[in-house]
Image: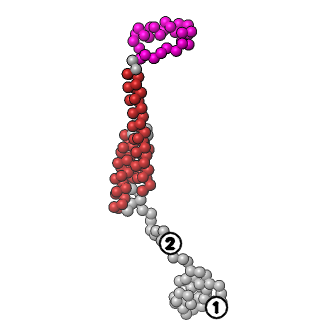
C-alpha cells in the first residue's frame, strides 16, 4: 500500500502516513504535512562567540572609568575581532560593535574633558589673579584680616 499524497510505501492497515502525516482512510480529513524550514532557519549548534569581541566590549565600557585608555584598547580589539569573525564565521558581531562604539565614545569624552580642563587652567593662569572682591565680603567680621594674610602669603 502506498500513500496517496507523498507516494511513500506504507505498512498494511496503516492509518497515518509516517512520511507526510496524512490519513490513509478514504474521505478522512488529511493532516497537512509540516512545512519546510524557512530560509532564516539555521540548523546545527549556534556559532561560537569570538572572545576578542567580548573583550572589546568590556574594555570599551571600562574606558569610561580609566580615562579612555581601556577605550582605545576596546576600539582596536573590536576592529580586529570584526575582521577575524568575517574570516572564521564566529559569532559576536554585536559585542564587537559595542566595543568599538563604547571605546570611541569614552575616548572622545575624556579628550573633551581634557580640553576643557586645559582651557580652564590656561584661562586662570593668564588672568593674573585680578578677580574683583565681592562687596558683601567687607561686612563679614575678621574676613578682611584673613584676606590680607592670604595676599601676603601669596596664596
Residue occupying image coordinates x 36% and y 45%: 73
Q: Is residue 120 above or below residue 84?
A: above
* Image quadrant where residue 3 sits: bottom right
The spot of residue 9 in percent (x, y) is: 52, 90
Q: Is residue 84 above or below residue 105?
A: below
Read off the magenta span: 129-155
Residue 36 appearing in the image: yes
Residue 11 appearing in the image: no
Colouring of the image: secondary structure
The spot of residue 92 in percent (x, y) is: 42, 56
The spot of residue 29 in percent (x, y) is: 65, 85
Q: Which residue position is annotated with label 2? A: 38
Determine the residue located farthest toward the bottom in the rendered image: 1
Q: Is residue 152 above or below residue 67?
A: above
Quick check: 40 left or right of 85?
Answer: right
Quick check: 119 left or right of 136?
Answer: left
- Tell me the SS state at disc 2: loop
Q: Which residue position is annotated with label 1? A: 26
**Quick check: is 78 in the magenta stretch?**
no
Q: Earlier in the sequence, mark 1 or mark 2?
A: 1
Residue occupying image coordinates x 36% and y 43%: 72
- Tell me the SS state at disc 1: loop
CA separation, marks 1 and 2?
32 Å
Residue occupying image coordinates x 60% and y 88%: 24
**Along the line of sight, the residue nearer the viewer: 119 or 75:** 119
**Quick check: is 154 in the magenta stretch?**
yes
Please identify the quadrant where the N terminus is shown.
Answer: bottom right
Amino acid at each position: 500500500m502506498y500513500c496517496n499524497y507523498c507516494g511513500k510505501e506504507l505498512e498494511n492497515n496503516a492509518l497515518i502516513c509516517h512520511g507526510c502525516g496524512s490519513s490513509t482512510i478514504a474521505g478522512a480529513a488529511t493532516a497537512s504535512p509540516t512545512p519546510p524550514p524557512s530560509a532564516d532557519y539555521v540548523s546545527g549548534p549556534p556559532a561560537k562567540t569570538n572572545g576578542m569581541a567580548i573583550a572589546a566590549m568590556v574594555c570599551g565600557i571600562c574606558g569610561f572609568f580609566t580615562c579612555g585608555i581601556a577605550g582605545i584598547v576596546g576600539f582596536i580589539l573590536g576592529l580586529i575581532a570584526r575582521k577575524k569573525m568575517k574570516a572564521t564565521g564566529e559569532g559576536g558581531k554585536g559585542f564587537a560593535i559595542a566595543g568599538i562604539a563604547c571605546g570611541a565614545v569614552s575616548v572622545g569624552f575624556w579628550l573633551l574633558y581634557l580640553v576643557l580642563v586645559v582651557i580652564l587652567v590656561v584661562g586662570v593662569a593668564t588672568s593674573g589673579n585680578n578677580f574683583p572682591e565681592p562687596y558683601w565680603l567687607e561686612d563679614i567680621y575678621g574676613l578682611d584680616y584673613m584676606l590680607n594674610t592670604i595676599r601676603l602669603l601669596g596664596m
